[in-house]
Image (cartoon, rainbow, N blue to C red):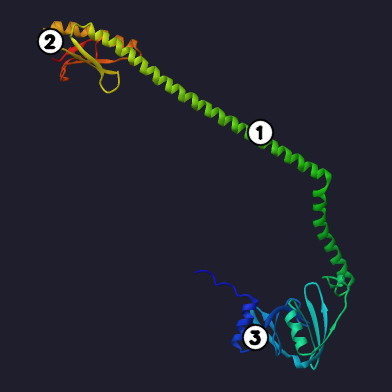
């Protein structure tokens, strides 16, 4: 189960006002004279007056309510981060609040005399308001340190040597980027050139292969023409000259076994040498078949000879 979200001080006061039927007003943080310095105090300013809420341990510990009619005049002392109101009349109270506009507006509305305390600007700063020498010394030291922490880096950043160093670094960065781009362009150009060469080489290889095949086919055709009608055609089995069909005449069906063996071994060697010489296959296997592809002879796997299958 997720932990319940912690309520803010404002939410606690608003709920307290609703639960106790108090008049709603404008809430602001602040402090009250004679309260503890670490006490959490919120003031609700409304048309009838103002209510001061003291919080302890995240709960409302005390409520003090005041009416505008109880006061005849107020001394107002403006500081850098808050405004102090010292109210006089039937009641007397001094409080500091961070958001003074609603409070001052109600003072004007109820015709409460306002006396503004004049201070030099530096006496409105933290550490200088009480005019305590010890506090002013501490505050001065802190302000000087803060100024140095801001000014020194700015001055150092704008020194001529620092500017020159930044310019040198920037120039080096631009130079490196230019070199990297030049190298990338060179690599891209080299890769493109290599790809174009490879494409051209493949194209040339295909043309060479076609030329070799054409020349080999021409030589095989001449061999067929010189076979006295015993060879009909020679072609690769499946577009590869590693396995070749040599189609023969039906006249072999009437020949003796010895005649078939003699002719097949000689013709097989001649065909094989012409294919190897043409450079289109390294070790072609020749299959002698009839027109219907029934076998006359096939290569012997273990010998440089042929087995008659007819």
In-front residue for pair 102/87? 102
Residue 95 x, y percent position in the rendering: 77, 82
**Residue 226, x across and y down, in percent:** 23, 5
Q: Residue at x 33, y 15 (%)?
A: 214
Label 3 vs label 2, nearer the camera: 2
Residue depicted at 53% across the width and 26% down the height: 193
Residue 178: percent from the left, percent from the top? 66, 35
The image quarter containing residue 276 is top left
The residue to which callout 3 is attached is: 24
Q: At x 68% / y 86%, what residue is drawn? A: 62
Dot 2: few (<14), some (14–19), or many (≥20) neighbours within 10 Å?
Answer: few
Above or below: residue 8 compared with residue 183: below
Q: Residue at x 80, y 80 (%)?
A: 84
Mark number for residue 251?
A: 2
Whole-Å distance between the Cαs marked 3 and 1?
A: 71 Å
Quadrant containing the C terminus in the rendered view:
top left
Q: CA distance from mark 1 to mark 2?
A: 78 Å
Foreground: disc 3 or disc 1: 1
**Circle 3 residues within 10 Å: few <14, some 14–19, many ≥20:** some
Can I make out residue 40 in this image? Answer: no
Which of pointers 3 and 1 lies earlier in the amino acid sequence?
A: 3
In the structure shown, which secondary structural element does the residue marked by tag 2 occupy?
helix
Per the image, the residue denoted by label 1 is 179
Q: Earlier in the sequence, mark 1 or mark 2?
A: 1
Tag 3 and tag 2, C-beta contact below 8 Å: no
Q: Nearer the viewer, residue 264 or 51?
A: 264
Task: Examine the rendering and report whether any part of residue 308 can be seen.
Answer: yes
Left or right relative to 66: residue 305: left
Q: Quadrant of residue 137?
A: bottom right
Is 80 placed above or below 66 here?
above
Q: Secondary structure at mark 3?
A: loop
> Mark 1 near mark 2, Cβ–Cβ under 8 Å?
no
């Amino acid at each position: 189960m997720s932990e319940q979200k912690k309520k803010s001080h404002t939410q606690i006061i608003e709920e307290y006002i609703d639960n106790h039927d108090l008049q709603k007003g404008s809430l602001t943080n602040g402090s009250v004279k004679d309260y503890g310095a670490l006490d959490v105090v919120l003031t609700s300013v409304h048309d009838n007056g103002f209510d001061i809420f003291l919080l302890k341990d995240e709960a409302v510990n005390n409520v003090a309510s005041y009416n505008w009619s109880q006061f005849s005049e107020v001394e107002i002392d403006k500081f850098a981060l808050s405004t102090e109101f010292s109210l006089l009349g039937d009641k007397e109270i001094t409080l500091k609040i961070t958001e003074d506009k609603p409070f001052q507006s109600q003072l004007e509305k109820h015709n409460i005399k306002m006396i503004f305390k004049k201070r030099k600007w530096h006496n409105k700063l933290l550490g200088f308001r009480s005019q305590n020498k010890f506090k002013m010394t501490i505050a001065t030291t802190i302000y000087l340190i803060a100024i140095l922490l801001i000014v020194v880096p700015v001055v150092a950043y704008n020194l001529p040597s620092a500017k020159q160093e930044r310019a040198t670094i920037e120039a080096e960065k631009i130079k490196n980027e230019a070199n990297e781009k030049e190298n990338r362009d060179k690599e891209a150009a080299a890769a493109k050139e290599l790809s174009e060469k490879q494409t051209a080489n493949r194209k040339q290889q295909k043309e060479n292969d076609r030329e070799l095949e054409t020349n080999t086919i021409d030589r095989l055709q001449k061999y067929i023409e010189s076979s006295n009608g015993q060879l009909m055609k020679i072609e690769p089995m499946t577009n590869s000259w590693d396995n070749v069909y040599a189609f023969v005449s039906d006249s072999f069906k009437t020949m003796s076994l010895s005649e078939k063996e003699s002719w097949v071994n000689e013709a097989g060697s001649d065909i094989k040498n012409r294919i190897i010489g043409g450079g289109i296959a390294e070790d072609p296997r020749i299959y002698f078949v009839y027109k219907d592809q029934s076998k006359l002879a096939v290569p012997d796997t273990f010998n440089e000879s042929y087995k008659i299958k007819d």
